[in-house]
């Protein structure tokens, strides 16, 4: 039986032990404060975590960002004087620069909203691939859950049922929305989770 992976000896910390039996963050706090649990998060601590823990993590479990996150739960970090997505910093560290500026740091685990920064869960993906991931994981905010939605699901289904039977402009007037929104619903760019097959 393989030996269990060593974890940080600080109670409640399940991060990999790297030095003196501590994870990189607790070791860095010991170096700075002579106490592995002393002091506040020091400047540069989040980057240390990204480069010395997240970017080498190979666990199957998600690795949660232990610092402050956005209201949506996403991890952010200051690097070179600018605020970046932590997942994007990890992805670039591990996989090199993105193929294009449009590529996203996509989470195969679907847990970006929980602040996962495990490098083995993150890859470069096109916007379309990333959106497909969100649909697969059930994390895409769509339909009535979207605070900017102008219609309810029953209306979206009706709009789909009118596809090819009237112009976008006429349908839009019937529901008090723009012709462009009708077109987006018909193409599947809006309300993509609805089953459109019966209306084709």
Image (cartoon, rainbow, N blue to C red):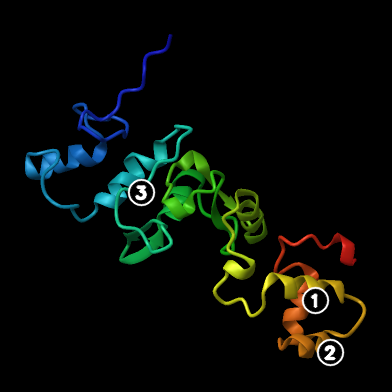
Q: Is residue 74 left or right of residue 163?
A: left
Q: Nearer the viewer, residue 166 or 1?
A: 166
Query: Which residue appears farthest toward the left when viewing the image?
Result: 34
Foreground mark, 1 or 3, reads 1
User: Can you identify the residue that label 3 sits on?
Assistant: 65
Quadrant the C terminus occupies = bottom right
Ranked by sequence position, the earlier of labels 3 and 2 is 3
Residue 31 screen position, x and y as percent: 12, 40
For image coordinates 76% across by 67% down, the residue present is 188
* For the residues bearing labels 2 and 1, Cβ distance under 8 angstroms: no
Residue 10 position (above or below residue 152): above
Tell me the CA gap for discs 3 and 2.
49 Å
Ranked by sequence position, the earlier of labels 1 and 3 is 3
Residue 74 position (above or below residue 170): above
Tell me the CA gap for discs 1 and 3.
42 Å
Residue 4 position (above or below residue 174): above
User: Can you identify the residue that label 1 sits on?
Assistant: 159
Tell me the CA gap for discs 2 and 1.
11 Å
Q: Nearer the viewer, residue 193 or 17?
A: 193
Q: Which mark is residue 131?
A: none
Residue 48 screen position, x and y as percent: 28, 46
Q: Secondary structure at mark 2?
A: helix
Q: Is residue 26 left or right of residue 57?
A: left
Residue 150 position (above or below residue 4): below
Disc 3 packing (10 Å; few <14; some 14–19; many ≥20): many
For image coordinates 35% across by 46% down, the residue present is 50
Q: Nearer the viewer, residue 58 or 166?
A: 166
Ranked by sequence position, the earlier of labels 2 and 1 is 1
Q: Quadrant of residue 81?
A: bottom left
Foreground mark, 3 or 2, reads 2
Q: Which mark is residue 170?
A: 2
């Amino acid at each position: 039986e393989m030996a269990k992976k060593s974890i940080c000896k600080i109670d409640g910390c399940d991060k990999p032990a790297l030095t003196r039996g501590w994870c990189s963050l607790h070791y860095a706090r010991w170096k700075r404060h002579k106490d592995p649990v002393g002091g506040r998060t020091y400047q540069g601590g989040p980057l240390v975590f990204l480069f010395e823990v997240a970017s080498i993590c190979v666990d199957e479990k998600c690795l949660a960002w232990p610092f402050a996150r956005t209201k949506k739960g996403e991890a952010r970090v200051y690097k070179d004087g600018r605020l970046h997505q932590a997942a994007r910093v990890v992805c670039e560290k591990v996989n090199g620069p993105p193929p294009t500026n449009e590529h996203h740091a996509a989470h195969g685990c679907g847990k970006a909203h929980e602040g996962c920064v495990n490098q083995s869960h993150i890859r470069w993906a096109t916007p379309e691939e990333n959106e497909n991931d969100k649909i697969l994981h059930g994390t895409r905010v769509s339909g009535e859950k979207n605070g900017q939605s102008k219609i309810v699901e029953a209306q979206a289904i009706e709009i789909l049922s009118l596809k090819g039977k009237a112009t976008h402009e006429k349908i839009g007037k019937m529901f008090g929305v723009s012709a462009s929104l009708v077109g987006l619903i018909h193409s599947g760019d809006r309300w993509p989770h609805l089953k459109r097959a019966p209306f084709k």
